[in-house]
Image (cartoon, helix red, strand yellow):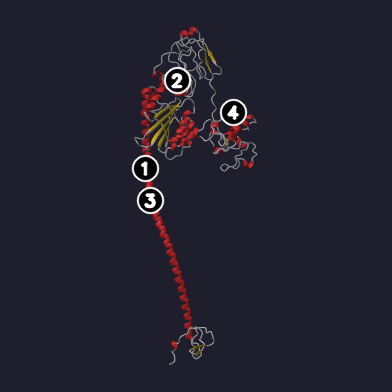
Amino acid sequence: MPARFDEIAFVPTQKATSSSRSRGGIELPPSEPMGSPIMLNGQESAFSAETTSRLTHYYEVDNERQVFIHTILKKLEADQKRINELELDLEDQKRSRASYQSKAIELEGEKEKLVHYINKDSFVVVLIDGDGAKFADEFVRDPMGGAEKAAIRLKQAVRENLRDTGVAQDDIPIIVRVYANLNDLSKSLRLSRIIDSDDDMRVFAERFTNSRADFDFVNVGKGKENADSKIRRMLNHYWRNIQCKKIFLVGCCHDNGYLHDLRDYSGSHDNRIVLLETTPAEPAFRSLTFPIIRFNEVFRSEPLTNETKHSFSMPPGLYSPGQPSLAGPGPIARPTPSMKPVASMPPAAPQEQRRTSTPIPNPLSASTASPILTTSSPDQSAAQPPRAASVISSGNGGTSISYATAGGVSDFQNVTVKAPKPKKQPKVIFSNVDGYRIDSPTQHPPRTPAQTSYQAKFQNVKPSVFCNDFYLKGRCKWGISCDKTHDIELTGPELAIHRYKARTSLCPNGPYCVDYDCYLSHHCPRSPCTRGEMCPFYDTEKWGDLHLGKDQLQPS
């Protein structure tokens, strides 16, 4: 039976190695190529062509499926690898988080302990410049009981202030340190008729120190900067101590001595430093943003009489218009050997009377140019009662000595009143129309042996250098903590050389510096300057070229 049209099969094509094949000795005709349709009656069927096309399409689809499957398998393999890595990272993060949480809990516990220890051992310190702040007269006049009362009153005033500022621990320790030149302070109080004897102030200081374990009255001895340097050092020490909650500075704003030091501490958000004024504070201190308070019930609010005037005072009733009154700040001459010794001292006036007594008008000018020599006769001396005259020094640092009844009972004496020392010229800063500071002219030191000796000393202190503040200002705020050299003595010519070297450096504050004692330059000191771009004043980063012309060097 002939094959049906739709049952025609395709025979795969195989390449024969010869033109004919044999099977069991019977030769077969050559096979048709693969995909070749079986010819019916010698004609290619249309169905065969369509089937071939479909088979080709199916082959392509199969290939695409295979590629797609391989792609999916590769993606699955990569994703599985990434999942494994993420699982490892997750385990690592879990361990790290557990470790961090454990450390955080441990650190939080340590923090609470530290806060507890800090608050447990916290304290407040009161630093008093005893040369600038004097305790109230009522305390000093009674050295035995007044010192204890002054300590109690000071402690109460500090605690009341702490309640207003948030440090409200009733049991917080209060440390008080008073630094003063006790000898000169005693003399000033005696000359101002606050105390009768210098020993009264020494007793007061001793009783004040023994009144509380945390209270000390320290005698720093003679020297203008002794108390200042100690307060600066202790201020820096307590500022660095986080257990110190408040620092009260007493008597440090009556002059500008502490102004530059306090600027280093301004701008702090915790307001740990409190300025306590006794006499009115200098205006510049109010720009430092520190709180300024007063304890009028503890400290004297007015300066001593010997801090404001220079005069001779006599007890009431001992002055007569016919007897000239000597005045002036000069010392009274000691009695010569030919004079009679003082036989007796006049009785001291009561304290109340001393406080209300007024100075006698001075008929002589304090600015007398030549010494005044007065001589009284024995007859006049016999008719006149003994005088009690005193020379008032200006402040605690004065060296004038008071002599009661300098001429003795007979008052036969020569008294020399020296003219007062000329007042120091006020410090000024000149500036031009642009507001730039103008420095005074300077010249290169001459070629003298001082150049060689200075260089030798300069080389000997290397790698250290001379402290500019110590040698050029006379004081160094770091004191013994300064890492620069203080202990090499420089002569006057050597200091001039060192000052000139300092003038060749540019001030960090540039032309707007307001430090009266600044030893650096605020514009190029050379005229004309030959260093060009090598000059440190050429094209500065903040202020441009600081080579000022002749017109710019004129004060406005």
Label 1: few (<14), some (14–19) or many (≥20) C-alpha neighbours in 10 Å: few
Which one is in front in this view, the residue at disc 1 or the one at disc 2? 1
Label 4: few (<14), some (14–19) or many (≥20) C-alpha neighbours in 10 Å: few
Q: Nearer the viewer, residue 298 or 70?
A: 70
Q: Are marks 1 and 4 in contact (CB under 8 Å)?
A: no
* Location of residue 410 in the rendering, given as x and y in whole percent from the top left corner: 47, 9
Between the residue at mark 3 and the residue at mark 4, the CA separation in whole angstroms equals 67 Å
* Location of residue 454 in the rendering, given as x and y in whole percent from the top left corner: 60, 32
Indicate the quadrant containing the N terminus: top left, top right, bottom left or bottom right: bottom left
Q: Please state which amino acid type lies under the numbered disc 3.
A: Gln
Q: Find disc 1 in the rendering and name its residue.
A: 113
Sooner in the amino-acid sequence: mark 3 or mark 1? 3
Between the residue at mark 4 and the residue at mark 2, the CA separation in whole angstroms equals 37 Å
Between the residue at mark 3 and the residue at mark 2, the CA separation in whole angstroms equals 71 Å
Q: Find disc 4 in the rendering and name its residue.
A: 492
- Name the image quarter holding residue 274: top left
Between the residue at mark 3 and the residue at mark 1, the CA separation in whole angstroms equals 18 Å
* Vertical side of 236 occupied by 102: above or below: below
